[in-house]
Every structure is written in C-alpha cells, then in structure tokens.
Image (tube, grey):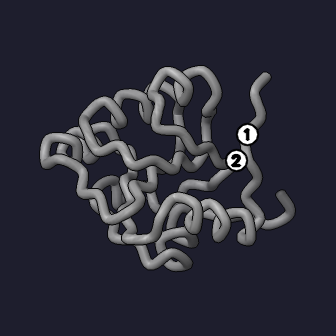
Amino acid sequence: MGNIVTVRDIVDKLGCEVAAGSRKLDSRISFGYSSDLLSDVMAVAGPGDIWVTVQTHQNIVAVGSLTGISAIVVTGGADPAPETVSKADEEGVPILTTEKPSFEVIGILYLMGIRGRKRE
C-alpha cells in the first residue's frame, strides 16, 4: 500500500455514519478483510485492518477487539444493535455504517489503495 489511509479517510470517501468509536478515526488502515463468518475473521484479520460485514450483533465488537482491527464497516443499510454500539464505544472499536452494498464498499476501498489481507 503506497499511501496512508485512515479510518477518517474511509468515512469521508464512503460517506459513512460513525455509529461508534469516533475517538479512533485517525487510526491507520493496513489491509482490508470481508467476511460475515466471525470465526473466519478471527482466523485471518489482523491489527490495522478494515473489516467489511453485514453483521450487526455485539459479537462483532469482540472480534474487532480480539483481532485489533482499526474499524468495522457495516454495509447494506444495516443498523448495529444499540448494545453493539455501546460496547464498541466502550472498547474503542469504530463502527461505520453505509447504505452501499459490500461489493461496492470493497471496490472503493481497493481504489483507495487498500489491499486484501491474505491467509497465512
């Protein structure tokens, strides 16, 4: 990745709402990962990643904290549950929401210079 991309850059480019974690918008993004299977994200995603998902329940915050990702993008107009938002604020995990479908979000992130994290 040649240029430095932050969570704030993604909010601006995608026109996301910041549902939680507004204190961490200057965190840098290393790679991107997309999956709706939590065990898959735990096995592959890593520190500094941006995670694209349609999941909205509280477990996404636990996975975000465990993996050290920089932010979660919830796509397709899905709204995180209130307990998810409060837990994410507590844990300092940014949750961004967008009406855009996952496929579009991933394409935009790719054009911003973010590449996918590969399985090791």
The quadrant of the picture occupied by the N terminus is bottom right
- Residue 21's x, y, as percent? 34, 53
Q: Give me the residue at 36% from left, 53% from top.
A: 95
Vertical arrangement, residue 4 with respect to residue 39, above or below:
below
Quadrant location of the C terminus in the rendered image: top right
The amino acid marked with disc number 1 is Arg
SS at mark 1 in the image: loop
Q: Which residue is mark 1?
A: 117
Q: Position of 80 compared to 2: left or right?
A: left
Q: In the shown orientation, is residue 101 left or right of residue 57?
A: right
Q: Position of residue 106 (x, y in %)?
A: 62, 60
The crowd level at tag 2 (other Cα within 10 Å; few <14, some 14-19, many 20+) is many
Sequence-wise, the earlier of marks 1 and 2 is 2
Asked if the residue at tag 2 contacts the one at tag 1, i.e. Cβ–Cβ closer than 8 Å, the answer is yes
Quarter holding residue 108: bottom right
Residue at 39 percent of width and 68 percent of height: 98
Pinpoint residue 84: horizontal percent, then vertical percent: 22, 42
* Residue beneath disc 2: 31
Residue at point 25% right, 38% down? Answer: 57
